[in-house]
Amino acid sequence: MPARFARPEVGTDEGGLWAMMDRQETRLQRSPFAIRDAGLRDYVQEIACRLGGTHCPDIRVHLVRTPMFNATMAPNGMMQVWTGLMLRMDNEAQLAAVLGHEIGHYVERHTLDRLRDVKSRTAFAQFLGAFGLIGMVGQLATVAGAFGYSRDQERDADRIGAVLMRKAGFDVAEASRVWANLVAEVNSRPEAERAANFPLFATHPGAEERAETLAKLAAEAPGGETGREAWQAKIRPYRREWLAEEIKRGRREESITLLTRLIAGGPEQADYLAARGEVYRLRAQEKDFDAAIADFTAAVALGGETPEAHRGLAYIFRQRNQLPEARASFQRYIEAAPQAPDVAMIRSYLEELGK
């Protein structure tokens, strides 16, 4: 691990980049996308510091509310972690794998290498967008075109990330699982749409190669902690919000693949079942309503009240003209979530259906 980086002189290319990143960081801090929960941010910051070692004082974690899988680290130490990524992490070790990978890019100064390859002003603006508000509005294809690391740089970052995980006491085997899970989501989409939705795959090593490499790195020093219980407890208060954002993302096949995996990994399945039921309901393909009813019913049976399950059932019953069932489910939704923003609309449905 190299020594901490001194702040470059403002008059240099690198110093100018740092100054621009500082301005982007200020914009990020003021953005409505920024999560201002100090407890969650400090928790992720601590994991990053365990990995970063002597670079810890220079790493500043920012959590960003957007349902895509992404994390970045700028040359000035600004790190972004998106909620779509955190939703997909099963444990601390998986998050550490991603953070360690980004720290690997940082300590090897890959971002600066990429900057030197950027020639045009348009490409430079896109490059900056990878760390700023462009990235947060989801223009990933544009950003990836300007910012993608080389495959050798990605391999280096994987290797460094594994070393950092091992030193911090995390189970390196979890790194390959992160990649395998993401590949499964990508493969659920029609082939023609995969590259457009996941442009970062264009610059990463092939899935099989990466899985094999990460598995070998894990085998060199097996064991370590996963931190599953701590991670699940920490994200529990945010899970329904993140699931709602995942549903709004509109990538039905990817969401079903993700939620099916999360359900299988239980034990707290009710929220995931309700979310998958809603995805099935919105997709509305053949037999999707039956699958949605099964998920909603299972979520309700598990307890730990999930209002969305009652609402989803009500919508399906209403569409199928099962009016008594629709009325009962709408009423249960209002009782379970009396302050929900759509309660007035649901009451209008009840009046329409009669009491």
Image (spheres, rainbow, N blue to C red):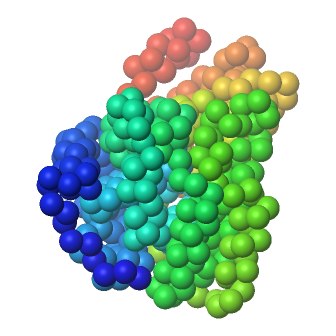
Q: Residue at x 30, y 46 (%)?
A: 34
The mark total stands at: 0
302 lies left or right of 95: right
6 and 330: which one is in front?
6
Q: Is residue 266 above or below residue 165?
A: above
Q: Going by the picture, which residue comes out furthest to the right?
A: 286
Q: Where's residue 353, x and y in %? A: 59, 12
Q: Quadrant of the C terminus?
A: top right
Q: Residue at x 31, y 49 (%)?
A: 35
Does any portion of residue 90 appear in the rendered image? no
Q: Is residue 354 above or below residue 274?
A: above
Q: Where's residue 244, x and y in %? A: 51, 39
Q: Going by the picture, which residue comes out furthest to the left?
A: 10
Q: Is residue 51 above or below residue 293?
A: below
Q: Residue at x 58, y 55 (%)?
A: 150
Q: Is residue 5 above or below residue 304?
A: below
Q: Where's residue 308, x and y in %? A: 55, 37
Q: Residue at x 26, y 56 (%)?
A: 14
Does any portion of residue 2 appear in the rendered image? yes
Q: Where's residue 61, x and y in %? A: 32, 61
196 lies left or right of 351: right
Q: Quadrant of the N terminus?
A: bottom left
